[in-house]
Amino acid sequence: MEITFHGAAHTVTGSQHLLGINGSQVLLDCGLYQGARKESYFRNQHFLFDPAQLDTLVLSHAHIDHSGNIPNLVKKGFSKSIHTTVTSRDLAVYMLRDSGSIQESDAAFVNKRAAKRGEPPIEPLYSAADAEAALQYFTGRNYAEPFEVAPGVTATFYDAGHILGSSITVLDIEEKGRKFRLCFSGDLGRKDIPILRDPTVVENIDYLILESTYGDRLHKPPAEAREQLLIVTKEAIARGGKIIIPSFAVGRAQDLIYAFHQMMDSGEVPRIPVYVDSPLAVNIARVFRAHKEAYDTQARLFIQNDRHPDAFQFPELTYTQSVDESKALNEKKGPMIIISASGMAETGRVLHHLRNNIENPNATVLIVSWQAPNTLGRRFVDREPRVKIFGEEYRVRAHVEVINGYSAHADRNGLLDYAKALKPRLKRVFLVHGEPTPAGALAGGLKELGIENVTIPDLHQSVEI
């Protein structure tokens, strides 16, 4: 078998790994690369393989850095099955439609400004129609139910505990008389985080493709992250300004809604308006409500005992859908919370909220997700005094707060513990979805555990196993 690492190599975005097995080509994930605009556009447009020659796509979960380039894949000739969990399929329906619309609207906005400067227009990466065309190929699968993806290759999904529906993919492979098991972690979740169950430990793995996002650091306990959120929220409310939170529409947004719901119902913070400014969020909430079977015990108990029977709806919460509703938030005064996509502040309505509040010293920009290099979110984390939004420079006068403990990724100990549980049979580990420093640190930790054969593949590197 040959593995070629076409994405998420030495970086955390654009997950894409091509397997050549028994003459078949199986693609694991097809995510958007996110970074500097020109580089991202080029990398996402150009595949270094023929999409029409793929035999299948296996999708770990619905986050855009894992699923977001599927419409391009289909536009360029892919027409086979896309296997994912039932919940991830339901999420992807809304996420890819939304991504296509965002690609179109952002291109239109940039082109309007470019025209004033006499610059040529750009084409959107793909359209909403392209996204719609891709959805016909999705097939939903249940956890722990094997299915064939290619001759000699059987796949099984297990709960990764990262977002609702996220999966660890195990491939049972028979090739040239040899049988072995390959495990792709996708994004591996943490233990004891709100809403989600803990990641499933799968046995008898020979080869492991493991994410390494936080391979060099430890997370604060979820309870400490919640306490930080409480403190930041109280301080921001006291200043009287808006709290702008760039957030992934799936996963982190629900974590925040759930936390603010608990804090307001318990009286820990005053009841102030909370806006989830994303057309996507209403539909995502429907998916979450439809899949309560994926919640952990604590989330089920909260729903059972709280006076609001819906974890993702309470009186202070408003989901804004239309552009006019979004624009109206700019005119509202007083403290409020605005949760808006995207998680790395690269696209979508959050850019408009940031542009309108970034120079207000009473406002707060709250970063609650890992931020890739060259993104606007990373520039906030790095405390850059000036940032560009839609090509225009702004001085950062708003308070910038960063809470890392809300990560849904396993930290160094979580990753090492997961690999250690597989050690008795594990022959080789490939570290992806991490920058060089955390990936290198995790490789060192794995070797200390006695797992000697660890590879950090380069972008487009091919490896035979």
Image (tube, rainbow, N blue to C red):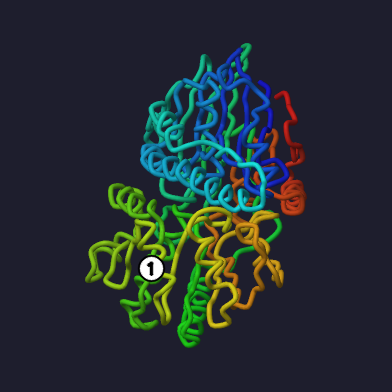
Task: Give how far across and how far down residue 71 sits, in percent.
Answer: 50, 32
83 up-or-down from 261: above or below: above
On the rendered image, what quadrant is the N terminus found in?
top right
On the rendered image, what quadrant is the C terminus found in?
top right
Q: How many marks?
A: 1
Residue located at (28% from left, 68% from top): 314
Secondary structure of the residue carrying numbered label 1: helix
Q: Quadrant of residue 460?
A: top right
Judged left or right of residue 369, residue 465 is right
Judged left or right of residue 286, residue 37 is right
207 up-or-down from 423: above or below: above
Task: Give how far across and how far down residue 283 sits, in percent.
Answer: 33, 50
Residue located at (68% from left, 23% from top): 2
Q: Name the amino acid, label 1.
A: Ala
**Foreground residue, 70 or 195?**
70
**Foreground residue, 295 or 201?**
295
265 up-or-down from 218: above or below: below
379 up-or-down from 130: above or below: below
Task: Give how far across and how far down residue 45 sits, in percent.
Answer: 62, 33
Residue located at (57% from left, 69% from top): 403
Q: Quadrant of residue 302?
A: bottom left
Label 1 neighbourhood size at 10 Å, few (<14), some (14-19), many (20+)? few
Which residue was labeled with disc 1? 328
Task: Give how far across and how far down residue 359 sits, in percent.
Answer: 60, 76
